[in-house]
Image: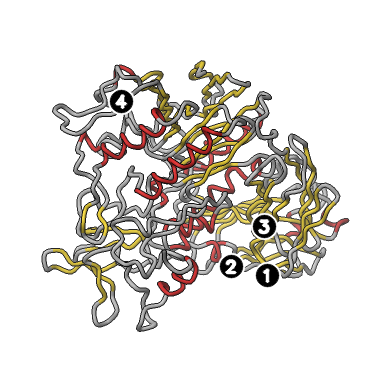
Amino acid sequence: MKTTYILSFLFLSVSIFAQQPEIPASYSNIHYDKDNQLYFEDNGKKYFAANAQTEYSIQKLLGKPSGTNSGVVLDFGNLKGSVTYGLIPYGKAPHPLPVYRFTQALIEGKAEINMVDAFKYPYDFVGWKENGFLTLGYRVADNNGMILFDGVVSLSGTGPFQVLPAIYEGPFVSNLTDTGVVVWCKTTLPVQAQIEIDGKIYRDDVPKIHHEWQINTLKSNQKYEYKVTYGLLSQSYHVTTALKKGSRQCFIFGYTSDSRHATGGGERKVYGANAYIMKKIAALAYKENAAFVQFTGDMINGYLSSKEEQHLQYTNWKKSIEPFWHYMPFNVGMGNHEALGYVFEDESGKSKGFIDRFPFGTESAEAVFAEAFVNPISGLISEDDNKYDTNKEQIDFPSYAESVFYYTYGNTAMVVLNSNYWYAPSLSKQTATSGGLHGYIMDNQLDWLRKTIQKLEKDKDIDHIFVTQHTPAFPNGGHSKDDMWYSGDNTKRPWIGGKPVEKGIIERRDEYLDILINESKKTVAILTGDEHNYNWLTLTHEVPIYPEGYPSKKLNVSRSIYQINNGAAGAPYYAQEVLPWSKFTQSFSVENALCLFYVNGKRITMKVYNPDTLNLIDELEIK
């Protein structure tokens, strides 16, 4: 085994020249030139990594607010566009959102907002003159009308005004258990915040921007009011703890994926995310009293080289469901659009390679995902120390922390996988860089899955297991050329250190399914996305799942299992394709969809709704 993971990451983050991060040994044909420029070499030709330019960032769009005698000035630098703003009625609505009232063009990137005139009687519905403080919500759009960011600024005084810390993300509830929860948020300025819940106060030790409180002294299935205080301001919501592990009491959970921004303008394209549909999904799940929502991948447009822009798109996605995430957890997994990397280009700017960004500890897609969300941490570390690892003395793969994990609720377990780990988007056509393959569950993760399933199989408190990863085992519309199929081409596989791994994509798909079918009796379904549609398939021994003349060992399907695909959370739709298993595919729909699972003891039913129109798309007795 290697030295500690953290120490190795620190070593990896600094090259021997103290100028550039060391190139992981898991890659191939990647080098620095004499000027420390990163390049990829293929057949004697060099392709240099494009500079990671950040057009937009959270820091820029927070607007550097400064108080004035009559209100506040927001400064967005060189941005051309407009800002729309209105008061946020915290404490007066269960799901407080800005009540937008005014729009003004940015002048040299600035907006000067006159609070005294704009929100005088009778437009002061939050009582800011009496209270001496207020919170303003603002929406920034570019010159083409695309919404870039929904920001928040808090002020004290009645003129002159002083800028206060404001919560611009959250508070969110995550990692819900039968005895606790993690509550977290982000503020615009450092502040020593606190949460009060169940008569106890948990306080930050120092002023900070990211606030995270682990509460683990609660009782199961109890509703708890909580209050987050940050300086002069506070927000109050409630959360209900999970059913006691092993409880057979009825509960509901939701599932969906794929909400990257779409066409149609407005909130359908809030830079990176389809906020319109996501807000509808969250509202419907909350109305139906879902205990939690599992969302597995492609929440944002992604495919970026800038960590700052990646965080902005994640924030826009989080903001779209924030009013409901105050109360109900949204548990998230990674997809291919969460890709963040180095793009190697030719002289014309055409991409010749795209690999996961390094140093992996701070710059990879996995690291930035873990920074953006709060998920459980499993014992799975990385793909280091697998049999293909060429350098046993350093970390050559990203961490799995917070992208592969499992959690339980009552008598049900949800296992979350990362089928886009160490993802190199160009790998299926350009293997010379090495990298992870879209849809492939790598060796250490597969071993972790097997051990996790074995553990849950032995757990008498667990009746049902769901496994979720972004990519379908059996694509049906939009991704037949990849996912776990690649048009039936088993030669597709990850490359490590310039060499292909032993098992191809179809062989690995079968090993994965073998664990869920033949090593498990409790696994009910795999929940997938990637394809922007809803459908389901019952895999039995009658379903054809191989290309013609497939020469390798075939899967023994000893019992049936469902694949339920719901990638219909707002990304542009994909229509159905003709594939070997098409006649077994049921209820195919391109409507936006939320799957709601009703778990009642040993029984499970599913209802699927269009969150925009509220019509019932499908209903299924699963177990």
In the rendered structure, the answer to whether residue 415 lies left or right of residue 98 reads left
Q: CA distance from mark 1 to mark 4?
A: 66 Å
In the rendered structure, the answer to whether residue 479 lies left or right of residue 372 reads left
Quarter of the image where the N terminus is located: bottom left
Q: Secondary structure at mark 3?
A: strand
Q: Residues within 10 Å of mark 3 (few under 14, many from 20)?
A: many
Q: Residue at x 60, y 24 (%)?
A: 599
Q: Secondary structure at mark 4?
A: loop
- Mark 2 vs mark 3, foreground winner is 3
Going by the numbered disc 4, the residue's amino acid type is Asn
In the rendered structure, the answer to whether residue 611 lies left or right of residue 243 reads left
Going by the numbered disc 3, the residue's amino acid type is Glu
CB contact under 8 Å: marks 1 and 3: no
Q: Which residue is mark 4?
A: 556
**Label 2 or label 3, whichever comes before in sequence order:** 2
Q: Position of residue 377 (x, y in %)?
A: 55, 52
Give residue 509's quadrant in the image.
top left
- Mark 3 vs mark 4, foreground winner is 4
Q: Residues within 10 Å of mark 2 (few under 14, many from 20)?
A: many
Q: Position of residue 160 (x, y in %)?
A: 79, 69
CB contact under 8 Å: marks 2 and 3: no
